[in-house]
Image (spheres, rainbow, N blue to C red):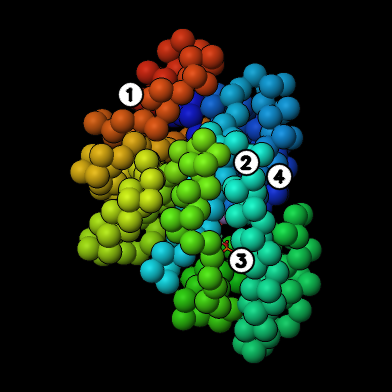
């Protein structure tokens, strides 16, 4: 099964394992025709990705995944078709990046208390872009030290609420971040809503606030949703009159739930976030229809 549209992916500019150009080449090799690079809190990979996309003959969508705080919880908002030169977006992302270094020091201090020394230096050796030092880089260090067998297992034992190495952090303001995306001409997408472990009431209130702030789409199909959640969030999209998005959230081989270009189709009834995008016209006559209706080889 292959899918030609993938609107959520990461490179070494944040916590992915492939450089932007290698990521684009891998996407193209996997059959992707329209790829969004959505690095955490940084748009620094888009120029390189664009050159690679032209060479590979696929369309690149300018994207970003912004870390925000909503009701004391960490939530991710993907921006698609953003203008990476927009000043308010750039300033906002720079402020988030500035907080990551200090947070990393607190994570390392907590791990040290739990008997794991040297994690700050260790994590930075995995961060190709030190501005985006993230829990993923700490996870890779813990795997290297054979403390945990793989990065997914790390997030069960460490770095999450209630476990060693977790620290509270104040990310960007929820509504402000949606405002930056819109100011840059982009579309705000609520990323992987099934990951937040919210009950129905809180989820509805998150989606209400998201819409109120100008959010327009929700990820329905993503690597971290189960098949049941594809259906559940397709229903949410319809109930809240939101466009539906799809993306693997690929970080690297062996670290991601889903590879590039291997997404199932959006459930029927969803209005795809790309329904009026010109990219869809320029990359093949029947592309939008194929991806909207089904996946095929
Ligand atoms: P940070 O932005 O530093 O909080 O790191 C968040 C990143 O950690 C996410 O974007 C994922 O790449 C990774 N991550 C978080 N939770 C998990 C998990 N349960 N399994 C695997 N990776 C995770
Ligand atoms: Mn990540
Ligand atoms: Mn995310
Ligand atoms: Mn992501």
Q: Secondary structure at mark 4?
A: loop
When the figure is inspected, residue 64 is found, relative to residue 95, above or below; the finding is above
Spatial separation of the CA atoms under disc 4 and disc 3: 20 Å
Q: Earlier in the sequence, mark 1 or mark 3?
A: 3
* Residue 257 appears left or right of 16: left
Q: Nearer the viewer, residue 162 or 272?
A: 272
Give the crowd class for mark 2: few <14, some 14-19, many >=20 residues within 10 Å.
Answer: some
Q: Nearer the viewer, residue 184 or 291?
A: 184
What residue sits 29% from the left and 46% below the top? 233
Spatial separation of the CA atoms under disc 1 and disc 3: 36 Å
Disc assigned to residue 243 = none
The residue that label 4 is drawn on is 44
What residue sits 52% from the left and 42% below the top? 183
Q: Earlier in the sequence, mark 1 or mark 4?
A: 4
Q: Secondary structure at mark 2?
A: loop
Spatial separation of the CA atoms under disc 2 and disc 4: 13 Å
The residue that label 1 is drawn on is 293
Tell me residue 200's x, y (percent). 23, 61
Q: Is residue 80 visible?
A: no
Q: Earlier in the sequence, mark 2 or mark 4?
A: 4
When the figure is inspected, residue 100 is found, relative to residue 157, above or below; the finding is above
Tell me residue 56's x, y (percent). 68, 22
What residue sits 26% from the left and 30% below the top? 268
Q: Nearer the viewer, residue 47 or 228?
A: 47
Q: Secondary structure at mark 1?
A: helix
Disc assigned to residue 135 = 3
Give the crowd class for mark 1: few <14, some 14-19, many >=20 residues within 10 Å.
Answer: some
């Amino acid at each position: 099964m292959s899918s030609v549209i993938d609107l959520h992916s990461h490179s070494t500019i944040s916590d992915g394992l492939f450089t932007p150009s290698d990521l684009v080449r891998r996407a193209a090799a996997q059959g992707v025709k329209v790829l969004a690079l959505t690095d955490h809190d940084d748009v620094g990979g888009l120029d390189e990705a664009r050159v690679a996309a032209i060479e590979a003959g696929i369309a690149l969508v300018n994207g970003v995944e912004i870390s925000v705080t909503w009701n004391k919880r960490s939530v991710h908002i993907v921006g698609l078709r953003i203008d990476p030169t927009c000043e308010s977006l750039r300033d906002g992302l720079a402020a988030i990046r500035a907080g990551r270094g200090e947070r990393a020091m607190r994570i390392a201090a907590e791990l040290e208390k739990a008997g794991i020394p040297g994690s700050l230096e260790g994590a930075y050796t995995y961060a190709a872009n030190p501005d985006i030092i993230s829990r993923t880089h700490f996870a890779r260090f813990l795997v290297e030290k054979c403390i945990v067998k793989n990065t997914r297992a790390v997030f069960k034992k460490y770095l999450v609420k209630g476990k060693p190495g977790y620290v509270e952090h104040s990310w960007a303001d929820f509504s402000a971040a949606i405002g930056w995306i819109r100011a840059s001409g982009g579309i705000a997408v609520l990323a992987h809503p099934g990951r937040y472990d919210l009950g129905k009431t809180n989820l509805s209130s998150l989606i209400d606030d998201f819409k109120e702030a100008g959010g327009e789409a929700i990820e329905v199909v993503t690597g971290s949703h189960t098949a049941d959640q594809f259906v559940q969030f397709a229903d949410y999209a319809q109930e809240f009159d939101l466009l539906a998005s799809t993306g693997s959230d690929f970080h690297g081989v062996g670290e991601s739930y889903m590879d590039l270009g291997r997404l199932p189709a959006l459930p029927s009834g969803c209005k795809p976030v790309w329904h009026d995008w010109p990219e869809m016209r320029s990359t093949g006559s029947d592309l939008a229809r194929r991806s909207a209706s089904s996946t095929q080889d």
